Image (spheres, helix red, strand yellow):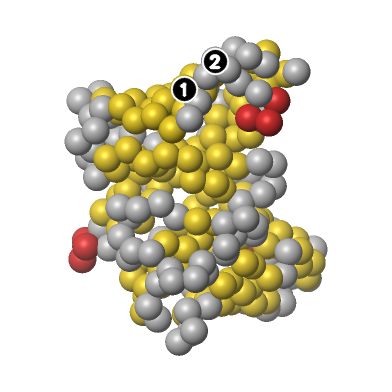
Amino acid sequence: SQQGEEDPQALSIQEGENATMNCSYKTSINNLQWYRQNSGRGLVHLILIRSNEREKHSGRLRVTLDTSKKSSSLLITASRAADTASYFCATDERHQGGSEKLVFGKGTKLTVNP
Amino acid sequence: DSGVTQTPKHLITATGQRVTLRCSPRSGDLSVYWYQQSLDQGLQFLIQYYNGEERAKGNILERFSAQQFPDLHSELNLSSLELGDSALYFCASSTSGTTLYEQYFGPGTRLTVT
C-alpha cells in the first residue's frame, strides 16, 4: 500500500533557486519523515516532523505539515548542484496487532543545474 | 556514512538460485528493516526485526525470509529467484522498534537475476 505521494515527480531548477516538493498521504499519522537518495545509493534521513508540529527547519531545509489537509511540503532554499537527488516522504502506517511500518512515496527527482 | 553496512554490494545470479544478503546495523541499534527498491514498485518495506524477534511484516514473498542474530546483524534470504526479484535491497536500522524515529540506511545490495 502507498501512503505518501510526492508531487511533482520531477523538478529541474537552476542553482540558487528554491525547490518545493509536496507530499500527500491518506490516513492519520504520528510523524512524517523526509529522506534523500542520491542515484543508486542508500537513503539519508533529512528531517522528521511529528503530527503535533506545523513547521520544522534544518539548515536550508524547511518542512511544513498540515494534518487537516494530510499534506507536507519540503522547501530547499538556495539550492546547490549537490542537492540533485530523489526526495521521498515516509509516513508511519499502523497494522492490526500494533505493528508499524514506514511507507515511502515514489519520490520527487530534483535536478539542480549549475 | 550511516554506520550501517551491507554485503555484498552487487550480486548477479541465475533464476532459481538462492542468495543471502547481510546487514550490520549501527552500533547500539536494535531494529533492522529490510526494503526492496525497484523502478516499478518504488521502495517497499519487507520485514523488521527488533532485538532478534520479528516485529513487523510488509510485502515479503514466501520465497524470502530473514532473521536477526544475537549480535544483531541480519540476513535476508531470497530463494527460487525470478527475474522480477532484480532490485536494490536496502537494510536500515533504528534505535527504536517503532516508527517514531528516523531510520539509517545502508548502501544497498544490487541484485541482478539473469
Kind of residue at disc 1:
Leu
Q: Is residue A41 left or right of residue B64?
A: right
Q: Is residue A41 above or below residue B47?
A: above
Where residue B47 is drawn, which disc sits there? none
Closer to the N terminus: mark 1 or mark 2?
2
Q: Position of residue A4 (x, y in %)?
A: 39, 37
Q: Name the chain letter of the residue that bears numbered label 1.
A: A
Per the image, label 2 sits on a secondary structure element best described as loop
Marks 1/2 same chain: yes
Per the image, label 1 sits on a secondary structure element best described as strand
Residue in the foreground of this view, choosing between B63 and A105 = A105
Q: Residues within 10 Å of mark 2 (few under 14, many from 20)?
A: some
Q: Position of residue B22 (x, y in %)?
A: 61, 74
Please identify the residue farthest to the front as the structure is shown: A59
Residue on which disc 1 sits:
A75
Residue in the foreground of this view, choosing between B55 and B29 = B29
Kind of residue at disc 2:
Asn
Q: Is residue B109 left or right of residue B58?
A: right
Which part of the image, by quadrant, shows the N terminus of chain B? Answer: bottom right
Q: Is residue A114 above or below residue A25?
A: above
Say if mark 1 contacts mark 2, CB within 8 Å.
Answer: yes
C-alpha span from label 1 to label 2 = 7 Å
Please identify the residue farthest to the bottom as the structure is shown: B70
Q: Position of residue B64 (x, y in %)?
A: 54, 73
